Image (cartoon, helix red, strand yellow):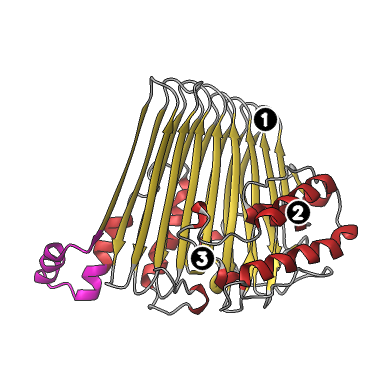
């Protein structure tokens, strides 16, 4: 793979934007600002600190095409875990599927409510801003109870890139539970969504995301949230069955008493790669954040955790905590962890921790001595490690993530070819 592939592909995306610009809807100023930022940075190499553990060359090796035209994608059965949720918004191969959706009254397609921020700090988010044409906008008024909404992404078109943009605005005291499932197959595709979330005073969003893009899936997402006074964000993430994934979170606790809880599990096997990069900024008094990740890494897979808590001078009485726990299931499995604290206030409680280890051989021996076969014993220990990952998420719907994690564990091991993070491992 050429060392210049990142520059070559970056230039190709800029040329594609120039050719497509006239057909894009507003806000064009935000798109052009993002294009300028992307022209300055391009797809970042591992020399860029934020991408030190993430090699984008496997992604750049594909000449992904943007969706063209409209039309209904073939219907595919829902996972049984998601069938009970009847309020649904479905995107297939980058296009909203109206006939197969049953959206809530507070939903609008992106083209009907297109205001979004440039989001230029991340080159991948800047690309999304340049090309986003589809997505959802959910707007709940003050005191509104939005119930539970299911957001589905299907990506089965070979060689396609989907830059979906989602906007969620909850007025003061509003409540919403959102379950998202992104799935794909063996065909190479790139799902690059961006989420803009604003929570008013006292609002609460419970967001459960299950990413399973398949052995051909590249998944890069950026999630931006701003929390008002006493607002709550509870977010559960499960990454299981995706060749290459990088999930970025930028959460700002802007109002006094705001609370954010991010609980994530990455289940990786074969040559899969998973990166969770999270930045939580405490910009007001008495704010609370918790960021926990559990990695289970088998065979030659690789997991990354980058977490940063920043406390501004206004963030007195902050309580921030982050922890990464990793279970390595083979000598070839790899984990990279980089927790950070930046504290500019003097009355705070902030801490972080990280553990990396193998299966406890004594525990395995104990189970086998009780007549449990070796594979079943290993499965029990892995399940015990993952158990409780989403305990802090109050919604009943969090059981969907627990059941999906159990289903992944029951699948046979497989090799995921496109992830290849060969150099510098």
Magenta stretch: residue 246 in it? Answer: no
**Dot 1 alpha-carbon crowd within 10 angstroms: few under 14, some 14 to 19, many 20 or more:** many
Q: Is residue 217 above or below residue 140?
A: below
Could one spot residue 86 in this view of the protein?
A: no
Residue contact at pointers 3 and 1, CB within 8 angstroms: no
Is 185 displayed left or right of 262 in the figure? right
Could one spot residue 65 in this view of the protein?
A: yes
**Dot 3 alpha-carbon crowd within 10 angstroms: few under 14, some 14 to 19, many 20 or more:** many
Foreground of the two, 279 or 359: 279
Where residue 84 sits: x, y (%)? 56, 56
Of callouts 2 and 1, the N-terminal one: 2
Residue 55 numbered mark, or none: 3
Magenta stretch: residue 371 in it? Answer: yes
Mark 2 to mark 1 CA distance (whole Å): 31 Å
Image quarter of residue 157: bottom right
Q: Which residue is mark 2?
A: 35
Residue drawn at (46%, 46%), measured in percent from left and top?
396
Q: Which residue is mark 1?
A: 171
Of callouts 3 and 1, the N-terminal one: 3
Where residue 272 sits: x, y (%)? 45, 70
Where residue 244 sits: x, y (%)? 51, 67
Where residue 201 sits: x, y (%)? 60, 25
Is 154 displayed left or right of 241 in the figure? right
As helix, strand or loop, the secondary structure at mark 3 comes to loop
Q: Is residue 49 above or below residue 183?
A: above
Q: Which residues are magenta?
A: 357-378
Q: Is residue 100 above or below residue 332?
A: above
Mark 2 to mark 3 CA distance (whole Å): 22 Å
Residue 389 numbered mark, or none: none
């Amino acid at each position: 793979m050429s060392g210049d592939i990142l520059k070559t592909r970056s230039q190709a995306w800029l040329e594609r934007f120039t050719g497509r610009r006239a057909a894009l809807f507003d806000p064009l100023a935000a798109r052009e600002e993002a294009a300028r930022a992307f022209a300055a940075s391009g797809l970042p190499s591992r020399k860029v600190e934020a991408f030190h553990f993430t090699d984008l060359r496997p992604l750049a090796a594909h000449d992904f095409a943007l969706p063209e035209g409209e039309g209904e994608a073939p219907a595919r059965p829902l996972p049984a875990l998601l069938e009970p949720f009847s309020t649904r918004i479905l995107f297939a191969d980058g296009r909203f599927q109206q006939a197969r959706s049953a959206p809530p009254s507070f939903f609008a397609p992106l083209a009907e409510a297109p205001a979004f921020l440039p989001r230029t700090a991340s080159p991948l988010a800047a690309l999304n801003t340049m090309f986003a044409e589809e997505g959802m906008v959910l707007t709940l008024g003050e005191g509104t109870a939005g119930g539970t909404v299911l957001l589905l992404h299907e990506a089965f078109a070979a060689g396609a890139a989907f830059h979906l943009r989602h906007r969620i605005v909850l007025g003061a005291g509003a409540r919403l539970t959102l379950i998202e499932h992104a799935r794909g197959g063996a065909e190479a595709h790139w799902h690059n969504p961006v989420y803009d979330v604003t929570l008013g005073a006292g609002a609460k969003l419970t967001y459960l995301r299950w990413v399973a893009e398949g052995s051909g899936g590249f998944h890069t997402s950026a999630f931006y949230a701003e929390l008002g006074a006493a607002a709550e964000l509870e977010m559960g993430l499960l990454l299981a069955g995706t060749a290459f994934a990088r999930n970025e979170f930028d959460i700002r606790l802007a109002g006094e008493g705001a609370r954010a809880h991010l609980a994530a599990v990455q289940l990786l096997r074969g040559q899969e790669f998973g990166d969770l990069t999270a930045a939580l900024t405490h910009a007001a008094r008495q704010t609370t954040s918790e960021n926990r990740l559990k990695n289970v890494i088998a065979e030659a897979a690789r997991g990354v955790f980058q977490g940063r808590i920043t406390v501004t001078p206004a963030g007195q009485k902050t309580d921030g905590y982050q922890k990464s726990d990793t279970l390595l299931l083979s000598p070839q499995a790899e984990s990279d962890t980089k927790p950070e604290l930046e504290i500019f206030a003097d009355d705070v409680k902030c801490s972080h921790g990280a553990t990396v280890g193998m299966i406890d051989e004594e525990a395995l021996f104990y189970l086998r001595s009780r007549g449990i076969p070796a594979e079943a014993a290993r499965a029990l220990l892995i399940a015990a490690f993952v158990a409780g990952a989403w305990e802090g998420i109050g919604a009943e719907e969090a059981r969907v993530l627990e059941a999906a994690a159990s289903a992944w564990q029951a699948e046979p091991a497989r090799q995921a070819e496109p992830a290849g993070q060969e150099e510098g491992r």
